[in-house]
Amino acid sequence: MNLSTPCYDLGKFPNVYEPSEDTFLFLDALEADAAYLKSTKPEIIAEVGSGSGVVITALYQIFGTSCAYFATDINPQCCLATTLTSKLNNSRVECLTMDLLINFKPALFDVILFNPPYVVTDSQEMSGLGLNRSWAGGNYGREIIDKLIKNLPNLLSKKGVCYMVLLKENCVNDIVEMAKINGFESEIVIQRKIPGEHLYVYKFFRSV
Ligand SMILES: C[S@@+](CC[C@H](N)C(=O)[O-])C[C@H]1O[C@@H](n2cnc3c(N)ncnc32)[C@H](O)[C@@H]1O
């Protein structure tokens, strides 16, 4: 299945992350794994940190009206941008300003997508609700990533799967180990070296 990048317009949203190499790698991973995703017959899909909204809107190309689509972002401008992108592409995504997925009821989601702020920074750089929240990941770039991984057992449905962008400096093997302790197997869907970054998209799914 060919997953094209949805149209978007960030003209009114200067504090929203412009789709970049990591975003396009994420789209390539979802395209490559579309057959598997379809085989799980998802009904509820969520993207954490949707930014411009192109990733969750692209999934609408695969599943159309057979799924409900939710997005969250800590930055309120991102929710406006995601809603606009959804509209521009005749999709239907509900975006809420929220920390991760903390206000949803447990075990709701069949698919969770997250291209997190993964850059290694001081923890202080993670303050506020602006563009810095797109990249500032704190210690090992892992402060937000670890929170979501640890909460996966409460967020995903029984058949649920989570796709996440990770950076080599995040110490991916430690993340894989942490997921295992929480009951999840993992696999690399795609990886790419771009100038200055070695990026992965990992898939996390329940151990049988
Ligand atoms: C690297 S950007 C990715 C944006 C978009 N998904 C993409 O792939 O282009 C990370 C996004 O996560 C959001 N974010 C950071 N921390 C968050 C949190 N605790 N809860 C929800 N969203 C968060 C940021 O505001 C930003 O929009």
Image (cartoon, rainbow, N blue to C red):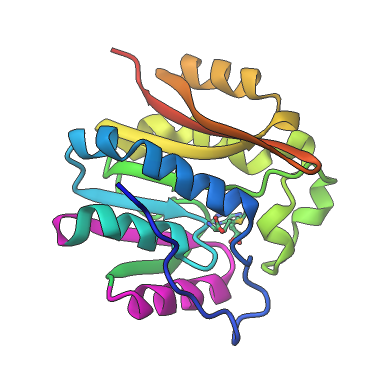
| Rendering coords of residue 188 (x, y %) | 50, 25
Quadrant in which residue 171 is drawn: top right
Q: Nearer the viewer, residue 169 or 61?
A: 61
- Magenta span contains residue 180: no
Residue 145 horizontal/vertical position (percent)? 60, 38
Query: Is residue 45 something that shows in the picture?
Result: yes
Q: Residue furthest bottom?
A: 12
The quarter of the image that holds ligand 1 is bottom right
Farthest-out residue, front: 2
Q: Position of residue 175 (x, y in %)?
A: 60, 24
Residue located at (48% from left, 15% from top): 180
Q: Nearer the viewer, residue 178 or 55?
A: 55
In-image side of 116 versus 208 (left or right): right
Measured from the top left, where is residue 73 in percent x and y?
A: 52, 62
- Numbered disc total: 0
Residue 157 appears in view: no
Q: Quadrant of the C terminus?
A: top left
Residue at 76% from the left image edge and 34% from the top image edge: 140
The boundaries of the magenta stretch are: 65-90
Residue at point 40%, 43% (across, down): 30
Examine the rendered structure and indicate whether residue 115 appears above or below residue 68: above
- Which residue appears at 32% of the width and 36% of the height? 156
